Amino acid sequence: MLIASFAGCVNSQDIATANDRLREKVVDLEKQISQHKGQIAHLQARVKEAETTASASEELRENTPHVAAIEIDSLSHLRDIDGDDKADELVVYINVFDGWGREIQLVGQLSVNALVIPIGYKAITLGIVSLGPAEVRRAYRSSIAGTHYTVNVALVVPEGVNIDQITVKAEYVDGYSGITYAVQEQVKSSGPINFSSSK
């Protein structure tokens, strides 16, 4: 009887473990189904848009949102990734607005260039990132505080270069109109920073 009871206990534990694994698989499959549904809806919307764009009314065309301006957020900052007390990455937050100052998403190509312009010397490029339409879409962030695009730029500076601010240039080329939007800002540090050197 003791052996039978022990076997029954073991079997119960095995069943519980198996049930937990099944629940995890169900949750994972449900997430995948939800993602696929969203992708299908997106594709259906694109097909429908292609069918109706040519015959769209003047009112519809006039009220279709378009990018009017991009800006580099003041919260953009330098970051020390490897913990050596040297900034080796620039985190750039880009805000996008339509003609009424409302937030809007980008569909096109986005590039961010980080450089320093020492007095009396030519500009030194510290890092540059170029994003295609798919990468731009993945860079989109949304929260209760609003929406923005996050671009991480790895910084590589010749040894011995000390600077206290970085010039950041961002350029967006609209995928539909081909119009280019550009902006330039300064990202300052609390003091001179000796950046990680190239090796």
Image: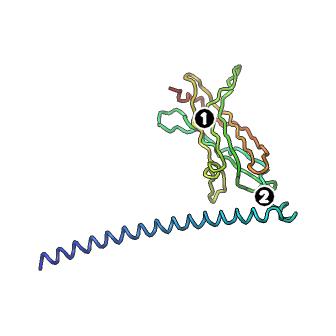
Residue at image location 62% in from the left, 28% down from the top: 163
Residue 13 lies, in percent from the top left, at: 26, 71
Which corner quadrant of the image does residue 41 belong to? bottom right
Q: What residue is disc 2 on?
A: 65
- Examine the rendered structure and indicate whether residue 102 appears above or below residue 74: below
In the image, 163: left or right of 22?
right
Residue 48 image offset from top left, x and y in percent: 73, 66
Farthest residue toward the right?
58
- In the rendered structure, which amino acid carries the disc numbered 2? Pro
Q: Which residue sits at x=15%, y=77%?
A: 4
Q: Is residue 40 above or below residue 124?
A: below
Q: Secondary structure at mark 1?
A: strand
Nearest the viewer among 101 and 153 is 153
Which secondary structure lies at badge 2?
A: loop
Dot 1: few (<14), some (14–19), or many (≥20) neighbours within 10 Å?
Answer: few
Q: Tag 1: residue type?
A: Ser
Q: Residue at x 78, y 58 (%)?
A: 65
Quadrant containing the N terminus is bottom left
Query: Horizontally, is 8 left or right of 67 in the view?
Result: left
Q: Which residue is mark 1?
A: 190
Q: Earlier in the sequence, mark 1 or mark 2?
A: 2
Residue 177 percent location from the top left of the image: 79, 49
